[in-house]
Image: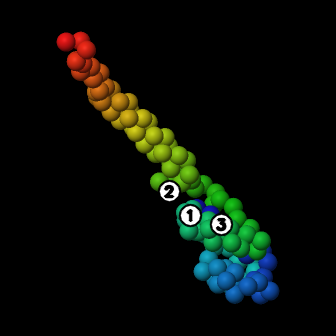
Amino acid sequence: MLKVKLVKSAISNTPKNRATVKALGLKKVQQTVTHEDNSTIRGMIFKVKHLLEVSEAPGEKRVVKSGSINAKKASLKSNREKLEAIAAKAEASVKKPAAKKKKATKEAE
């Protein structure tokens, strides 16, 4: 869980920034709201980080989501290992072409 606090007014900002602050549920300066820690909220916070103060809610454990970077790296690594194993297996099963036998020439006869 993330605690998000509006520390600067959004009045002099662009309409997109004002809409983002409103979407976060912040209406007044010094107001604090709590949100789940997910990529959507993190993206919104990133866009208006100059207006906010963000901290983790005390007593809450941060759970690694399946969409997190570390989880993606781990899955990519396991996928790469699987592909390498498949490629090695395919190389072993491919038969090398047999050497062509030379045709008997008329000279040899």
* Disc 3 residue type (three-letter): Lys
Give coordinates of residue 107: x percent, y percent. Answer: 25, 14
Identify the image quadrant of residue 60.
bottom right
Give coordinates of residue 26: x percent, y percent. Answer: 66, 80
Vertically, is 106 above or below 53?
A: above
Q: Which mark is residue 25?
A: none
Vertically, is 19 above or below 46?
A: below
* Disc 1 residue type (three-letter): Ser
Vertically, is 100 above or below 47?
A: above
Residue at image position (76%, 74%) is: 51
Q: Which mark is residue 39?
A: 1
Real-space Cα distance between discs 3 and 1? 15 Å
Q: Secondary structure at mark 1?
A: helix
Give coordinates of residue 38: x percent, y percent. Answer: 55, 63
Real-space Cα distance between discs 2 and 1? 8 Å
Circle 3 residues within 10 Å: few <14, some 14–19, many ≥20: some
Vertically, is 101 above or below 33?
A: above
Identify the image quadrant of residue 39.
bottom right
Q: Which mark is residue 3?
A: 3
Give coordinates of residue 35: x percent, y percent. Answer: 58, 68
Is 88 left, or right, of 16 in this rendering? left
* Disc 2 residue type (three-letter): Gly
The number of callouts visible is 3
Q: Which mark is residue 67?
A: 2
Real-space Cα distance between discs 3 and 2? 21 Å
Circle 2 residues within 10 Å: few <14, some 14–19, many ≥20: few
Q: Secondary structure at mark 3?
A: strand
Identify the image quadrant of residue 31.
bottom right
Residue at image position (29%, 21%) is: 99
Q: Are marks 3 and 1 in contact (CB under 8 Å)?
A: no
